[in-house]
Image: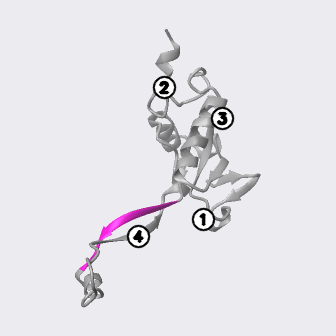
Amino acid sequence: MSWIYKNEEIDDVSSFPDNTYGFVYIINHLPSGKSYIGKKILIYTRKVKLTKKDLALYEGAKGRKPSFKKQQKESDWKDYWGSNKELINLSKTEPLENFTRNILITAPTKKLLTYYEAKYLMIYEVLEKPDLFFNDNILAKFYTKDFTL
């Protein structure tokens, strides 16, 4: 099942706007009418320890030798179903026709991605509508239980 962005299917990283770091999405479970809003990074950058072969390239070089290199790897965004356990279980047990996966907005940086996620969670009032959303917290600071006093 592909992601939908601006009414078009997205199934490859090259289909995203240039400089896209990640995206904010909404997954809808049609039978229950409940949704989940989250964020996903497209490309991970990680530090990898240099091998002996890599270190050999620095033989004779002046200064301190590096011990790590940066490596990029595409995330699992194509098959991603959010971090909510209830939604993940539903996606494994029900037919894919019961779901829609839409990208709300793309972001060029990690900071903006987090901002946009919080913005959409607030706009949709996910914590105040537990019967409509699977989300139960925002930024691990605000929880659904805070609204049921």
Circle 1 residue:
13
Query: Mark 2 sits on what residue?
Result: 142
Helix or strand or loop: what does disc 1 sit on? Answer: helix
Structural distance between the alpha carbons of marks 3 and 2: 26 Å
Q: Of callouts 2 and 1, which one flags the residue occurring earlier in the amino acid sequence? A: 1
Image location of residue 6, percent across then percent down: 75, 52
Taking the spot 70% from the left edge, 57% from the top edge, the residue there is 9
Colouring scheme applied when the structure was drawn: one colour
Q: Are marks 4 and 3 in contact (CB under 8 Å)?
A: no
Q: Amino acid at mark 4?
A: Gln
Question: Mark 3 falls on what kind of element?
Answer: loop
Give the residue at the far right of this rendering: 7
The residue mark sitting in front, 4 or 1, is 4
Kind of residue sitting beneath label 3: Leu
Magenta-colored span: 43-51
Of mark 3 and mark 2, the one earlier in the sequence is 3
Counting labels gives: 4
Q: Which of the two discs, 2 and 4, labels the residue nearer the N terminus?
A: 4
Q: Is residue 99 magenta?
A: no
Q: Nearer the viewer, mark 3 or mark 2?
A: 2
Q: Which of pointers 3 and 1 lies earlier in the amino acid sequence?
A: 1
Say the numbered circle drawn on residue 30: 3
Q: Earlier in the sequence, mark 4 or mark 1?
A: 1
Residue 71 badge: 4
Tell me the mark number nearer the camera, choosing from 2 and 1: 2
What's under tag 1, amino acid-wise? Val
Judge by depth and name the residue closer to the eye, 67 or 86.
Answer: 67
